Image (spheres, grey):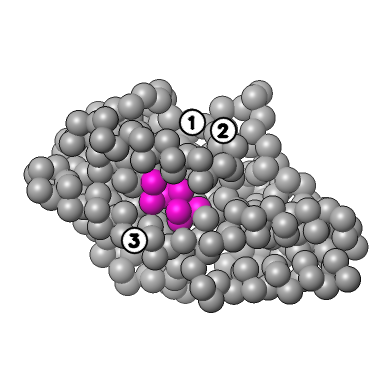
Amino acid sequence: MKEEYEEAIEWFDRAIPLFHSHLQPEIYLWKGFCLYWMGREKEWNGYLGKAAEIASEAGYDVDLKLINWIKAFLQYERGELDQSRKNNEAWMPIWAETWPNQKFFYEGAYHFLSGLIECKDGNVDKARSQLPKLKSLHEDMTPVRKDWVLFYFKYLSAELALRKGSPDEAIAAFEEPISYKPSFMNIDNMSIFLIYNLPCVRDVLPRAYEQKGDLDGAIAAYERFLIHDPETATRQLIHPLYHYELAKLYERKGWEGKAIEQYQTFLDIWKDADPGRAEVSDATTRLNILNQ
């Protein structure tokens, strides 16, 4: 949460030999998740494979399906929509069967991602068909993770509004802020905090302000992502791309000092990112121009 991912990885490395095999897949997933956050997707894929290997050898079907779940979201973010659909179809039944008391939540996560995939793929009617399903699940749920499904409903609503060029409608979806967190956190619940950070990039609100032409609103929305407010329950990790997007907005406003700071923060975190990442190339070019 302090954005010190290399040190987090060191602690995960220390943890791996100390943990029973049934928890080792999640440790490898967390180590890989840190690498993904640092723009090192090729290494992350290797740790996905390592986690899957351990889970498969031990017969941990639930862990294998967790990997499907995570892959589905990351493939959605990368625009690999056919693969995302396949992985989204694969995970949910076994999780709902294993924890029937959370069945509505798992169904909500499934319908949420289904809607995001179809929205990104231009299948707006298919995407919109997920909204009444999410609304119904939310109405029928017990309080546990009920706020998660409300977030899913509002986020998908906002994405659909942006798709049709209605930024005010997207902004209205978040008129009342939604703050939520895992119901509890311990070593047996690490997967829930992984799921809590999916999708990794959640910037529909600042994108709505930007689509509207309200740069100040977009900046304020991104800035909120960089602060963990103790008055709220929200504790998502800070995605490094927020620094990059915020820097570009600062630059457009003519706030060069602030832009330099955010570009540098982004590039420090992504210093070992996979070669060819367009964000790194663009941020480096912009930072060099600003420093002239």
Rendering coords of residue 58 (x, y %):
10, 43
Rendering coords of residue 10 (x, y %):
44, 40
Magenta residues (range) = 31-37
The tag earlier along the polypeptide, 1 or 3, is 3
Identify the image quadrant of the C terminus.
Answer: bottom right
The residue beneath circle 3 is 45
* Residue at mark 3 to residue at mark 2: CA–CA distance: 28 Å
Report which quarter residue 214 is drawn in.
Answer: bottom right
Tag 1, which secondary structure?
loop
Q: Is residue 194 visible?
A: no
Binning the other alpha carbons within 10 Å of mark 3 as few (below 14), some (14 to 19) or many (20 upward) gives some
Identify the image quadrant of the N terminus.
Answer: top right
Mark 1 touches mark 3? (CB < 8 Å): no
The tag earlier along the polypeptide, 1 or 2, is 1
Residue visible at 65% across and 44% down? 225
Mark 1 touches mark 2? (CB < 8 Å): yes
Rendering coords of residue 282 (x, y %):
68, 73
